[in-house]
Image (cartoon, rainbow, N blue to C red):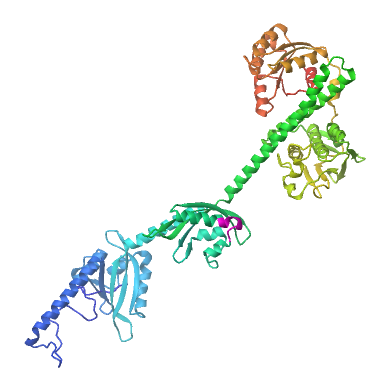
Amino acid sequence: MGDAKPSTGRFDAGMTTDSSAPIPAADAAGTATADRSGLPDRRRADDLLRAGEARFRAALIAGRMGSWETDHLTRLRQWSEEGMALFGLALPGGVGQVGGPDDEYIAAIHPDDRQLALGYRELAHREDSFAVEYRIVRPDGMTLWLSGRVLVVERDDEGHARRVVSIMADATERKLAEEQLRTERARLGLALGAGQMGAYDTNMRDGTLWWSPQTYALFGVSEDSFVPTSESVGAMVHPDDLEGFMRQRADAIAGHRPFAHEFRIRRPDGAEIWLDHRGQAEYDIDGRPVRNFGVTMDVTARKRAEEALRDAERKKDDFIAILAHELRNPLAPIRNAVHLMRRPGTPEATRSWCHDVIDRQVSQMARLLEDLLDVSRLSSGQLQLRCEPIALATAIDRAVEIAQPLIDAGRHALTITLPSQPLNLDGDLTRLAQVFSNILINAAKYTPPNGRIALVVERVADTAVVRVTDSGIGIAMQDMPRLFKIFGQVESARSHSQGGQGIGLSLAKGLVEMHGGTIAGRSDGAGRGSEFEVRLPLTPESAPLADAVTADDAELAPTDTYRILIADDLRDAADSLARLLQAMGHTVAVAYDGEQALRLARDMRPEIVLLDLGMPKVDGYDVCRLILSQPWGGTMTLIAQTGWGHQHDRNRSREAGFHHHLVKPVQPATLVALFRRAP
């Protein structure tokens, strides 16, 4: 709704600019009278009135204001020129209609604000003066915000507003600025929220501190209940970080520098988080700091990631040191055995002992390298099981056979308890033997000499339960969470003379889970021994079992003799394997590069070709392809011998045409088994 004002610009109740209006008679004090003697005073009053109206209209124009008077009795609205200019109207005599379809005022009100404007008339019945604000849509389509006041200048006998005057100003620029400010604040809020940041502003004169809503959220406190002050905030900062934070900020402010510092806080919910605090100060004309402001960011995730990287780096360094130690250990007895065998007159019994030493130490090194490769394959999802129906006792026997030398070296007493009825399961015999041997080797390493190790197997419903207990150094409670993590060797084992690499248990866990089972470790604490429990699902009793064939059985099995070509640029590897195969009765030729291998293959026509892949001149892949491309090469069995054992290496050798892919060091029994399958 609105109120009109006279077209002259006056909005005083009952005041007009008509020069013919009656002039009040002079009073006894000699004020202006209606007779001719009062004409100068009347002209002076008229001049003052015109000057006042001119100043009023000038103020309206300068303030982009307009006015109008609404008479609800006559249902007419008298517009000032400035009022019509605001609304974009051109009314004859500045007179408009109140109510009905021709009400120019109501027609101009923005549709979303029309009910609000209509409600102002009801408010006028109760208030003599009140503020209003709404939008209008001008005939040219422009939308304006208007803001001002409504004045009731006359009421009827019942007290209802009869005549009201509206004085309104164009508030569009202010409203747009306010909207832009709200938008910017909303964007700031989104940015702060997305970056897990909060803003703050400190008045250093009176100590008042302002926080953004995001800052309250970062500190885990409520805007309603928490008052941010230096004392209340300081109480939340971690005691180890408070002094450094305060000192660095004070030094930066004193030096007129921006400041940045990271510190921890303890929130009321008990959570400890890291914050990155960045800010700067403002100074008065004398250089004194008057305020400081900035942002605070939650960097807990980054700090934890950095800590995890440092921990991983430490574990990697420890692992490399342990691995070097473990690889050097077998080299010493191997070298000693070699020197002993070279001495003239060394008894045959001593030579046999030296052979056993070398064999054991090479097996230990090979097992370590295989564990590393298996962990890599397991983590990348490339390790595949070859499952078949087997007896659990067979896997246990294999595991004991592998771990027995280390158990004997520690003079440990090993007891094995098996159920009377065989337990059958669907599994990979080699991998399950690897699981149980790793657990037994772990027990032997971490048990002082003359210790006790027990392996107990029992059936619980459809599950096989295998428990391995020892009287060893035990596991501290704080180390339990890292027990099965890669390179997660526990602290209590680091100083142990036979400490491992932190690989075996991690590998065992992965292999057990691939079989659909679980593995768990328990200990009553350091010095009180350990227990490891493996649970595996059983298969029905009627399932056929695969025959267990050991490596020794394969090596002792009768075999034919073959023409064999060995190609390897590592001469010791090629020559030692050639001597071994010649001792078995085979005819062997040796090449040390790819070109020589091709010439020997053409001249010798071997039945078996053992190729290293990384040879000079022509690599093993191309040698394989070239042999198979010849009419005489189609009947040969080509076997890749390499130190590369990843799945993509195996895929590449298969694509080249190799029949088999063996990873060094190769067991002689494995070669014999492949020879028997040669065409």
Judge whether residue 119 is colored magenta.
no
Quarter assignment of residue 662: top right
Quarter assignment of residue 14: bottom left
Report the number of numbered marks. Answer: 0
* Left or right: 528 in relation to 572: right
Q: Main secondary structure of the magenta part?
A: helix
Quarter assignment of residue 490: top right
Q: In what quadrant of the picture does the N terminus appear? A: bottom left
**Towards the viewer: 518 or 426:** 518
Residue 375 in view (yes/no): no
* Left or right: 275 in relation to 589: left
Residue 558 in view (yes/no): yes
Which residues, given as a range, are shown in magenta? 236-243
Q: Position of residue 672 (x, y in %)?
A: 80, 19
**Towards the viewer: 305 or 427:** 305
**Towards the viewer: 595 or 527:** 527
* Left or right: 385 in relation to 253: right
Q: In what quadrant of the picture does the C terminus appear? A: top right
Q: Residue furthest bottom?
A: 28
Q: Residue furthest right?
A: 420
**Above or below, 322 relative to 588:** below
Q: Position of residue 22 (x, y in %)?
A: 14, 85
**Above or below, 581 relative to 141:** above
**Above or below, 573 relative to 270:** above
Q: Position of residue 379 (x, y in %)?
A: 68, 37
Q: Residue furthest top?
A: 603
Judge whether residue 242 is colored magenta.
yes
x 38%, y 64%: residue: 112
Q: Position of residue 34 (x, y in %)?
A: 11, 88
